[in-house]
Amino acid sequence: MSTDTPDASTDDTPSRAELAARVDELEDALAEATDEDDSKKMSIIATKGTLDMAYPPLILASTAAAFDYEVTVFHTFWGLDILHEERSKDLKLSSVGNPNMPVPNAVAALPGMDRVTTKMMEKRIADNDTATIEELIETSLDMGVAFQACQMTIDLMDYDEDDFYDGVTVGVGAATALQDMADADIQLLV
Amino acid sequence: MSAEFDITETLDVKGASCPMPVVKTKSAIDDLADGEVLEVLATDPGSMSDIDGWASGTEGVELVDQEEGNDVYKHYVRKTE
């Protein structure tokens, strides 16, 4: 806008005080922006509820919390069972569909086989002092991990808010998860 | 007990496996004051790499020393900042 005369006393020209205030403002904004970048974020979407698939999201969540990450785990479909206080203590391992199992699929499909493989796995977990699902959830909650239960799946499965561990957030949906993922440094679908 | 630093607290995570040694180390170090050293006793062989990785990726902690003894892995972590 300024034309030819760099006249200091023109109304348009900001005063020294105004400029100094503006610099302060920008410095504050910069400090705030840099501050925010300091804390890393991880966003996990947990979709599976078998005993073996419940571990990876919880192990990564608690470990990331130990790294001072802000962690959100959004549980949807069968992943919701991980947060279900009762069902989380009784997650099953499927004996079919996994060619690494010691029995052929034709045998694995027999009634009661899932219970056998689940018991086997539970025994190994106990023998190895591997943390239980419940321990991992309680530890993660203590460390500030945000567990979210997908509202649509809660309704679909006919679960109740009170079925979940204390501290679990309900009433959230895909938009919340997406926003978390957009803000996160690490995004995982498990 | 290598020299040069005093141990303030000892955390026993013998028997525990991933991710507990790292997770419990983090919780224990949060309770220390700046400059204090935490000794961590673990039996998980993965703790050698994991605690090293955690310490280098986390602000405010420094891995002072690691020792591999008779089936026990010892880690010494100082709280900084």
Image (cartoon, coloured by chain):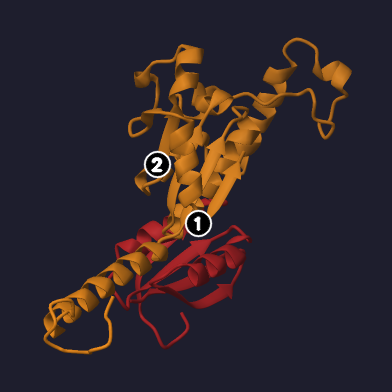
Chain colours: A orange, B red
Q: Dot 1 lies on which element?
A: helix
Q: At label 1, which amino acid type do we have?
A: Pro
- Residue placed under numbered mark 1 in the picture: B21
Depth check: A31 or A190 in front? A31
Q: Position of residue A141 (x, y in %)?
A: 38, 42
- Residue placed under numbered mark 2 in the picture: A146
Q: CA distance from mark 2 to mark 1?
A: 21 Å
Q: Chain of mark 2?
A: A
Foreground disc of the pair 2, 1: 2
Q: At label 2, which amino acid type do we have?
A: Ala
Image-based side of B77 in relation to B19, left or right: left
Depth check: A127 or A58 in front? A58
Q: Position of residue A8 (x, y in %)?
A: 15, 89
Q: Answer yes or no: is residue B22 visible.
A: yes
Q: Quadrant of residue A168?
A: top left
Q: Residue at x 22, y 89 (%)?
A: A6
Q: Residue at x 55, y 29 (%)?
A: A79
Q: Position of residue A85 (x, y in %)?
A: 43, 25
Q: Position of residue B63 (x, y in %)?
A: 48, 75
Does B72 appear above or below A187? Answer: below
Does A72 appear above or below A184? Answer: above
